[in-house]
Image (cartoon, rainbow, N blue to C red):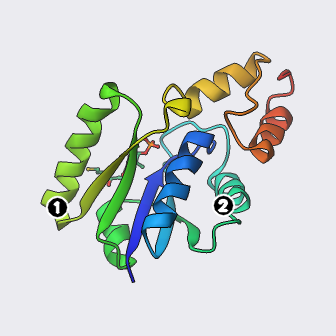
């Protein structure tokens, strides 16, 4: 089985993430979306909430499963029979850090990274910007799945 991991914080999942997950699901037998458990990073949604939202918005894909992980991504890969990471690249600014991680993951465990150029419709999108816009009542429709928009409204009551 050709399996790939799509790792991230997903706080929250955006339409840019979903675009990459959906395209990867057409290329691989199985896509494992792996949500990083990072207790040192302040997040809006808990890991459980992020996993729940991801499961809801990827339910239409028969070959996508959502898991959580902590520690090194390469260890998660080894434990799950995965040799490839898929990442979206939005702009040149993403490239330097992503290349460093890709090279390190290859050096650590020969885990390959495939970069997919993001859909230009979403190349300006980030979870951080979504949270900021929602916090101040901006309109995030079309940028995150409807279910996520609803959760943002509940979590940030001043939104919209
Ligand atoms: O959505 P993010 O926060 O940009 O995702 C970053 C993520 C989770 C892919 C990256 O931080 C990661 O892989 N963390 C796990 C720890 C690890 O393996 N670190 C060494 C990377 S070379």
Residue 36 shows up from this direction: no
User: Which numbered tag is attached to residue 58?
Assistant: 2
Quarter of the image containing the C terminus? top right
Dot 1 surroundings within 10 Å: few (below 14), some, or many (20 or more)? few
Identify the residue at horizontal 49%, vertical 65% (top origin). 26
Q: Which of marks 2 and 1 is nearer the N terminus?
A: 2
Decide: is 59 above or below 90: below
In the rendering, at what x and y percent does residue 46 appear? 66, 49
Q: In this view, does 24 lie to the left or right of 2?
A: right
Tag 2, which secondary structure?
A: loop
Quarter of the image containing the N terminus? bottom left
Identify the residue at horizontal 60%, vertical 38% (top origin). 43
Q: Which of these two is toward me, 19 or 96? A: 19
Q: Mark 1 points at which residue?
A: 108
Dot 2 surroundings within 10 Å: few (below 14), some, or many (20 or more)? some
Q: How many numbered discs, if any?
A: 2
User: Which numbered tag is attached to residue 69?
Assistant: none
In the rendering, at what x and y percent does residue 71 appear? 37, 59
In the rendering, at what x and y percent does residue 124 appear? 51, 25
Q: Is residue 88 left or right of residue 110?
A: right
Decide: is 42 above or below 79: above
Res. 148 image quadrant: top right
Decide: is 65 above or below 40: below
**CB at disc 1 and ligand 1 closer than 8 Å:** yes
In the rendering, at what x and y percent does residue 102 appear? 23, 50
Q: Which of these two is toward me, 96 or 67? A: 96
Residue 144 shows up from this direction: yes
Which one is closest to the eye, mark 2 or mark 1? 2
Q: How far apart are marks 2 and 1 (CA)?
A: 30 Å
């Amino acid at each position: 089985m050709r399996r790939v991991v799509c790792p991230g914080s997903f706080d929250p999942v955006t339409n840019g993430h979903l675009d990459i997950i959906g395209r990867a699901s057409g290329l691989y037998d199985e896509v494992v979306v792996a949500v990083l458990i990072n207790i040192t990073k302040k997040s809006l949604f808990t890991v459980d909430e992020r996993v729940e939202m991801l499961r809801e918005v990827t339910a239409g894909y028969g070959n996508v499963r959502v898991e959580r992980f902590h520690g090194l991504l390469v260890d998660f890969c080894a434990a799950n029979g995965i040799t490839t990471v898929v990442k979206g690249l939005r702009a040149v600014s993403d490239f330097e850090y992503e290349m460093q991680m890709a090279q390190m993951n290859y050096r650590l465990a020969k885990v390959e990274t495939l970069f997919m150029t993001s859909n230009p419709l979403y190349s300006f999108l980030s979870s951080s910007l979504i949270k900021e816009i929602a916090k101040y009542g901006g309109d995030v429709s079309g940028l995150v799945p409807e279910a996520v928009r609803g959760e943002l409204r509940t979590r940030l009551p001043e939104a919209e």
